[in-house]
Image (cartoon, rainbow, N blue to C red):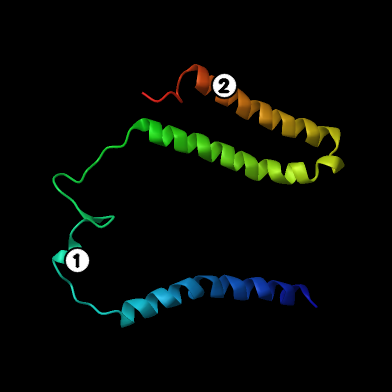
């Protein structure tokens, strides 16, 4: 098998990858019934009709908790392969993993001491 044939699979994938999600969306846009209505364009939230101003401002704490969750979720993504290969790690990889854990723990302690995670 030549190098060109090996890259052909990647080329076919690169061509087909945008087609597969776009094709059903295009077919649905062509076949769907188009009956615009005033009732259909109104704001709808969980089956309850909105009353008054629908603009709601969220507190910053929601975003902070979301960011902290995201940081630790990404940490788990990086640490899982490290933990699976734990018995095969050399000293440098072992130290790098613990440095990563230390930096994230340090950031959590800093946020905790600054009372960023306190709900007010």
Q: Could you say where residue 54 lies in the image, as x and y percent from the top left?
A: 20, 46
Q: How far, Cα to Cα, is label 1 from label 2?
A: 49 Å
**Mark 1, secondary structure of its residue:** helix
From the viewer's perspective, is 9 left or right of 46? right
**Residue ID for mark 1:** 40
Mark 1 or 2 closer to N-term?
1
Q: Could you say where residue 97 lies in the image, as x and y percent from the top left?
A: 73, 34
Residue at x 16%, y 44% (from the top left corner): 53
Q: Sort mark 1 into few (<14), some (14-19) or many (20+) by Cα contacts within 10 Å.
A: few
Q: Quick one: 22 or 50, which is closer to the camera?
A: 50
Quarter residue 98 falls in:
top right
Which quadrant of the figure contains the N terminus?
A: bottom right
The answer to whether mark 1 and mark 2 are in CB contact below 8 A is no
Which quadrant of the figure contains the C terminus?
A: top left
Q: Quick one: 78 or 9, which is closer to the camera?
A: 78
From the viewer's perspective, is 17 left or right of 89? left
Residue at x 46%, y 38% (from the top left corner): 66
Looking at this view, name the residue that lies furthest to the front. 48
**Residue ID for mark 2:** 109
Q: Could you say where residue 76 lies in the image, as x and y percent from the top left?
A: 64, 41
Residue at x 24%, y 40% (from the top left corner): 56
In the image, is residue 98 above or below residue 29? above
Q: Could you say where residue 15 lies in the image, as x and y percent from the top left?
A: 55, 74
């Amino acid at each position: 098998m030549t190098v060109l044939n090996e890259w052909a699979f990647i080329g076919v994938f690169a061509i087909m990858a945008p087609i597969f999600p776009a094709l059903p969306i295009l077919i649905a846009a062509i076949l769907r019934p188009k009956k615009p209505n005033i009732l259909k364009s109104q704001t709808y939230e969980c089956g309850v009709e909105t009353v008054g101003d629908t603009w709601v401002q969220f507190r910053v704490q929601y975003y902070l908790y979301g960011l902290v969750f995201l940081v630790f979720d990404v940490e788990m993504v990086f640490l899982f392969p490290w933990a699976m290969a734990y018995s095969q790690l050399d000293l440098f990889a072992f130290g790098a993993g613990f440095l990563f854990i230390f930096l994230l723990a340090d950031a959590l302690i800093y946020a905790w001491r600054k009372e960023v995670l306190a709900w007010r």
